[in-house]
Image (tube, rainbow, N blue to C red):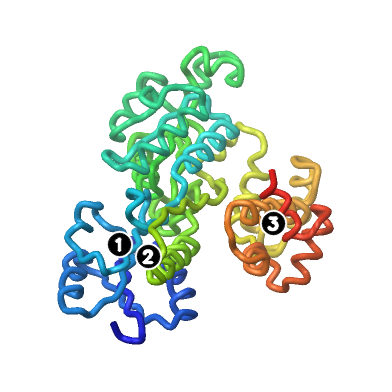
Amino acid sequence: MSNQIRVMFGFSGSLQEDLERYQGVMKVALREGWQVLGVHEQFERSLTRLVEAGAVDAVIGDFISEAWLGDLPDRIPMVHLGRHLLSDRISAVAVDAAEVGRRAARHLRSTGYKTVRVLAHSGHAASAMQAEAFAREMGTDPEGLTLRTPEELWRILEKKTGTDPENSEAETGTDPENSEAESGTGPVGVFCFSDFQARQVVLGAARRGIRVPDALGVLGVGDRFWDGVAAGMGLSSIPLPQVALGSRAAELLRERLRGQAPRGVRLPPGEVIPRESTLRSSFGGRLQAEVEGIFRSKLADPPDMGSLSRRVGLSRRAFELAFREETGTTPYARLLDLRLAESQRLLRHTDWSVSRIGELVGYPDPGRFSAFFRQRAGMSPAQWREARREV
């Protein structure tokens, strides 16, 4: 083995996710002095050839299966970086799929969708975990909520709304908030495995004349910019911590290179970013949800009030008055609430440094972050983390 560790990073083909994960890997690689080789095509075949040629010392990638890894030499430390963990014999890092499902259920319920479904990814372990947790959060059986194809969703909408799915609430002649669950009318909220799948649902609904979000609410996973552009509307989405996944994968690889035992790590997803695809015009709190979605996606560098008001289509004065009337507080005060909540989530569920967490929520200066946190939580970030560890 050469003095400089040669690490192969396998790109999966999802450009946005790959770049963010690679960024996370490189943060650790640069500190460790690793040489990182990115392989974009035929990852598994390329890895086999590089291992046979003695040109790689360690690997990070989204592997096909544990069975395939069995064909590689034991001397090559490997870390799986995918949507789900493998067995405890393989170091791996993934998002907590169950928490993704729970957050999806809470969002659709809070935005007024009483009839909900999960559009699953057939044969995918993470999708099954998301669907099960989603159903449990909704208090029902996963099998009754899980759809395998979009065609099943269209059939449900046809049955619920007849020939005109857009006017289901108007046809009841009653208060939709009180009658939807009993009558079977009202909008359907669908939780999709990915933003790509959510985009396909939105486009399919448009072809059928189904109005999103008032007849059909669509929630995806991944916060992929391009899918929202292609869908022609903002997609509500659960962001995945791709950079953090890459960093943690590299940290697990460092453990393996030092001879430590394999282990798996799950990281929590981000909070739902509400956008047009689930923000019903008939449901209260739409302005708050839209603004909070913008803030959550840019906690470290939020838009100023002028830019924010233009994004929601109001003058600055009208925006601030409308937001206060709806929420009882100001947009800036709500931003601070969200920063505190996210910093507390990271303190509790990650082992990242306090300074790193402060930077992620908009306070690159550790002193300012500590002062902000102490003022709102009554103790320093380190003290708050330690207190929660004892609970």
Q: Secondary structure at mark 3?
A: helix
- Dot 1: element: loop
Q: Amino acid at mark 2?
A: Asp
Characterize the local packing of mark 1: few (<14), some (14-19) or many (20 or more) Cα atoms within 10 angstroms: some
Q: State which quarter of the image contains the N terminus.
A: bottom left
Horizontally, residue 95 falls left or right of residue 111, namely left
Q: Position of residue 205 (x, y in %)?
A: 37, 37
Name the residue that disc number 2 marks.
Answer: 18
Q: Please give the name of the residue rendered at 23% of the width and 58% of the height, measured from the top-left corner.
A: 69
Nearer-the-camera pick, 96 or 170: 96
Looking at the image, is mark 2 or mark 1 earlier in the sequence?
1
Name the spot of residue 21 as percent of width and height, x first.
Answer: 42, 65
Amino acid type, mark 3: Arg
Q: CA distance from mark 2 to mark 3?
A: 27 Å
Residue sitting at x 63%, y 44%: 289
Residue drawn at point x = 63 percent, y = 41 percent: 286
User: Is residue 25 or residue 255 the one in the foreground?
Assistant: 255
Across and down, in percent, residue 104 comes to 50, 39
Circles 2 and 1 in contact, beta carbons < 8 Å? yes
Q: Where residue 157 sits in the image (x, y, percent)?
A: 38, 25
Front residue of 357/255: it is 255
